[in-house]
Amino acid sequence: MPSESSSSRCPGGGSHRASSAPAQEQPGDRSHRCGVPDALRLVARAATGILLLYTAPALVTGFFPVVTAWSVKLIVDRLAAGATVRELLVPALVLVATGIATGAVPHLARYLRTELDRRVGLFAQDRLFASVEGFPGLERFENPDFLDRLRLAQQTVVGPPVAVQALDGVLGAVRAAVTVVGFLGSLLVISPPTMALVLLAAVPTLVAEMLLSRRRAATAWSIGPDERRQFFYMGLLANVEAAKEIRLFGTGAFLRSRMIDSRRSADAARRAVDRREAGLRCGLGLLAAGVAGAGLLWTVGTAQGGSLTPGDVAVFLAAVAGVQAALTALTGDLAGTHHALLLLDHYQAVVRAGPDLPRAVEPRELPPLRGGVELRDVWFRYSPDHPWALRGVNLRLPAGATIALVGLNGSGKSTLVKLLCRFYDPTHGRILWDGVDLRDVCPSELRNRISAVFQDYMEYDMTAAESIAQGDLGALGAPDRIKDAATRAGVHATLSALPHGYDTLLSRMFFTESDKKDPATGVVLSGGQSQRLALARAFVRDRRDLMILDEPSAGLDAAAEHEIHTSLRAHRKGGTSLLISHRLGAVRDADMIVVLERGRVVEQGTHDELLAQHAQYARMYALQAAGYRSSTAPPATVPSQAPSPTSGGKGT
């Protein structure tokens, strides 16, 4: 059995490669690398001009409460001293200007914030999915931890982008700090004892708010699994694909109770925090009121003695209220920033993840397939915690030949296909394309030489022409190619009869209330028709070196299956193809049939040669053939083979 280090060894004679893809990081691993600078850089790259326009007024408004308090002080003191209208004009104009700015700036900031959301959201969404597109392999898409992180990352670009939320939190905190410092500085000038009183009331509030914000953030993180389970059950109960089974099996009440239990669990955690917060805030409110009342009595008494002016009393009152409000806003902004940065951490983890497969430093050109594809002592498992899906496979796919791959579920057939497409690299061993290791070529170049129909084919919510052209986007401007592919797949007549022919939308997801009864809005194909459409995608991707057909007729009736395999044989003629099917009658004309069992090649040869061996293939063929006989004699039994567990159904 191979050692674990074998997966990163560089085969002799090949070009030097990067070692292996970075290991999956767990939440929190990147906290030292992600923070406010990342958020600011993201916003600046998306909308530099809007950022500057938005930042200036957001910060300036922090001075408004202090300027207002000082304007009131000057007006009150000058009125008390019998000042003329001219002497009152300047502070009055400042007060009016501050009031106008206080009323106008929020509207400007709201517009700029909305525009910032649009631009940053567009930029961040494109960057996120460009990074996801850059993952050449499948490991991350079949990793539950990474999928969870990817879902959280998508939340950062849907709705208000969290980078802008983090920016708002920072600006709000700075604005509140400016207000607090301005008031404290004003009180220091007027009377140091009054500043000490305000601080006495403010410090406990600040400490308590910081503790509460941390507890809220910890609670939000701890109830994450309950919330995700709740959304999962909500999705099931509202999903059209799940509706049939839920109604037939009567599981709606069970799923609903699971949903409600998850919500109750999350609500209980929030309720505990809310109760503690309510009690603490009541106590702090009483403390602040007591300190403010005592300070007010002291200030009034001091003013009565002539040490303070009436304007000083006004500034003190404004400072007590302003500092309390600013500190509350400060802690709220800090908590909001912390939450936004936690989500941004997931976004940055995805964006910075890098390729999930080693990349050749100097990729080799992939020659046209002339000799064949060879697997040499290929071992593979999806992770060190999983069993081996392939065990020392040695296999050659000669150029120009049709090789059929058969075996029971869990034997490793689909896993082998994933390795041929280089969605994964072998844990040990090599796969050679005319002698060139697949790890030494660009995955995109390799895949450009391959056409495939997968068992779990896609159904695109696009027009019929667009759906077929997904096999080769160059066919979008060549309707004849699309129709030829559909004809070979036996679906041309069906598509031509649609309301708008090949331009008919194959979906009922996109329609308005006014046209939802119009069939031209969208048509849903049957399962067999959708499978033919997937075959058309493979046919439009012609002139490829290797065609992979993974259960290409599994959803078709007997007549359609015969028609499709006849078309496939004509299309494969002279080309190299790998055919996987559980229906052994469909593979009997292959040049060579390979039988996999528990990840090993146990038999290979022509149909007649394998029948003559009276081994695994012969028993499987006899079992299937017995279903078509009228005899009631029991068929030969096939030894049971438990499928090897894989990572979420990775191989069959």
Image (cartoon, grey):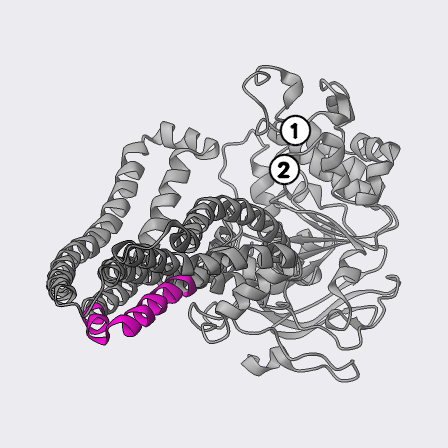
Q: Position of residue 13 (x, y in %)?
A: 79, 84
Expressed as whole percent of the image width and height from the top left, the position of residue 212 reads 25, 63
The alpha-carbon separation of the residues under discs 2 and 1 comes to: 9 Å
Disc 1 crowd, CA 10 A, few/some/many (<14, 14-19, 20+) = many
Q: Is residue 422 above or below residue 617?
A: below
Front-most of 37 and 293?
Answer: 293
Residues tagged 2 and 1 counted as in contact (Cβ below 8 A):
yes
Dominant secondary structure, magenta: helix
Residue 389 showing in the rendered view: no
313 with respect to 221 (left or right): left
Observer-nearest residue: 582 or 412? 412
Residue 196 belongs to magenta span: yes
Location of the C terminus (image quadrant) = bottom right
Say which quarter of the image contains residue 597. Answer: bottom right
Instruction: Look at 34% across and 50% down and name the residue there.
Output: 227
The front one of 346 and 442 is 346
The picture quadrant where one finds residue 314 is: bottom left
* Nearer-N-terminus badge (2/1): 2
Tell me the tag on residue 325.
none
Q: Residue at x 23, y 67 (%)?
A: 202
Residue 521 on the magenta segment:
no
At label 2, counting other C-alpha atoms closer than 10 Å, the crowd grade (few under 14, some 14-19, many 20 or more) is some
Query: Which numbered dot is residue 459?
Result: 2
Q: Which of these two is toward me, 147 or 159?
A: 159
The x, y position of residue 165, in whole percent, is 46, 56
Quadrant position of the N terminus in the picture? bottom right
- SS for dot 2: loop
Across and down, in percent, residue 564 comes to: 74, 35
Q: Tag 1: residue type?
A: Leu
Magenta region, residue range: 174-199
Q: Which residue position is annotated with label 1? A: 506
Residue drawn 44% across and 63% down? Answer: 170
